[in-house]
Image: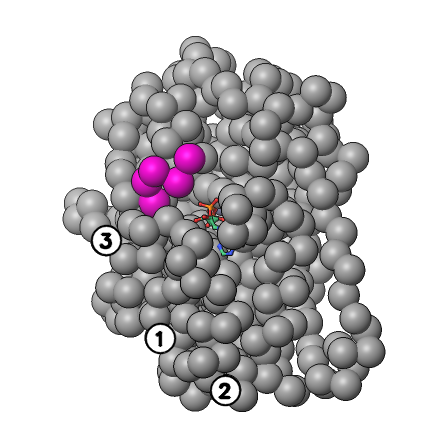
Amino acid sequence: MRAVMWGGTAYNVEVVDWPKPIIINATDAIVKLHRAGICGSDLHVYRGTNPGGSPPPFILGHEGVGYVSEVGPGVTSLKVGDAVVIPFTTHEGHLHTDLTRHIYSGYGFGIGLGGTQAEYVRVPFADDGLIRIPLSTNDTLINDYLMLSDIFATGWTALDYAGFEAGDTVAVFGAGPVGLLAAYSAILRGASRVYSIDYVADRLQLAESIGSTPINFRDVDPVQQILALEPQGVACSIDAVGYEQVNQNLTVQSDVIIQNMLAITSRGGGMGTVGVYVPEESNSPGAPRGSTVHTHANISLAQFQASEYSWGAGFSDPIRLTPQLLHLVTSGRAKPGFVVGDVVSIEDAPDAYARFERHEVSKVLLKFD
Ligand code: NAD
Ligand code: ZN
């Protein structure tokens, strides 16, 4: 089969022939991919920081939609031909459904399982580890479903980390696919006003198209701008960027967003962090431009306490959120696929990675037909 492979060199992925996965455990299924997402989390590996720390080569990707092509004898609720979303939270040996703590997906980070950016993937604990969806030939709808793999759930969860309640005002740092779906979730959940902060014009336009007020931090100081519009500050602020965040000069600065969040969040408000901060030890030796991880911030705990802030951080759990989010998509009340900027053949994955990493395109999907 064809597969997108990370061989260990930063800014370099290859499409190679690789053996098709086989059923190993009775509860496994093999899924034939129809579409796979490239995510900001794949960019960590691409840039030379390898959160799993496992030795390359490995197949990238942890988001996908496809069809069940084989089931093990222990799989009871799925049959060959079923259409499914592959949630990113399955890990070899553990299924993270009822836990409040998570670790990274086993897919696509070299942690046990091959990634979804391949023609086929093996899914352990398939009965619980796959989300069944209606069969559809509507590509727009399929893109909506694909967002259930990870980033719709992640955007939604960012609000929970910030203690969001309907009617709140929300500022989202980052208008990448994750930040856009955090802003979109806030609007779906009844936020009174939503602000999206980024510097990439096309992404800010997408934010505006869903009703979020765009703020370009290269043109204006986002703190001044938000406080001018919301003199009391916003109830919730979200970090949907992580360690790769840059300041106004586009220089990587690991605490610019938390400092901004502390400055704009109202007394008693909440902050939610879903942008990823991988451990500094995961820097690959000799990692090049922009790929070195720094994860420290200097914040005033006195200010934090006096402001009665709460701060939540972590990953999301697409399987746990399936009852809500699947229904929103199936009923047509949520169309999170609006973040998709391009759908390209798997053979074009190296170019797609490069364009996505440079923020030249919003979410990119790979297709296999
Ligand atoms: P992305 O790289 O496409 O988007 C990041 C955006 O942040 C870019 O548009 C960039 O211009 C913007 N940005 C940089 N500095 C900024 C600043 N100071 N203020 C505001 N915006 C700034 O990535 P993505 O796919 O949207 O993912 C974003 C983050 O979410 C990544 O760290 C990814 O690993 C993480 N993520 C977390 C989870 C989870 O479960 N917690 C799941 C998926 C992705
Ligand atoms: Zn993802």
Whether residue 353 is situated above or below residue 178 in the rendered picture: above
The residue indicated by pointer 2 is: 231
- SS type, badge 3: helix
- Marks 2 and 1, the one that precedes in the sequence: 1
The answer to whether residue 223 is magenta is no
Q: Locate the N terminus and report the quarter of the image it occupies.
A: top left
Looking at the picture, how far across and down is residue 258, in whole percent?
Answer: 64, 63
Whether residue 204 is situated above or below residue 85 in the rendered picture: below
Kind of residue sitting beneath label 3 = Leu
In this view, which residue lies farthest toward the top? 17
Looking at the picture, how far across and down is residue 216, in whole percent?
Answer: 40, 59
- SS type, badge 2: loop
- SS type, badge 1: helix
Looking at the picture, how far across and down is residue 267, in whole percent?
Answer: 64, 87
The answer to the question of whether label 2 and label 1 lie on touching residues, with beta carbons closer than 8 A, is no
Q: Nearer the viewer, residue 299 or 73?
A: 299
Distance from the alpha carbon under mark 1 to that under mark 3: 18 Å
The answer to whether 99 appears left or right of 176 in the picture is right
In the image, which is nearer the foreground, mark 3 or mark 2?
A: 2
Please rate how many residues cluster around mark 2, counting C-alpha atoms within 10 Å: few if below 14, some from 14 to 19, many from 20.
few
Q: What's the residue at 54%, 28% (across, down)?
A: 46
Which mark is drawn over residue 141? Answer: 3
Q: What's the residue at 66%, 24% (across, down)?
A: 287
The residue indicated by pointer 1 is: 188
The answer to the question of whether label 1 and label 3 lie on touching residues, with beta carbons closer than 8 A, is no
Magenta region: 358-362
- Marks 1 and 3, the one that precedes in the sequence: 3
Would residue 251 be seen by someone viewing this image from the given angle?
Answer: yes
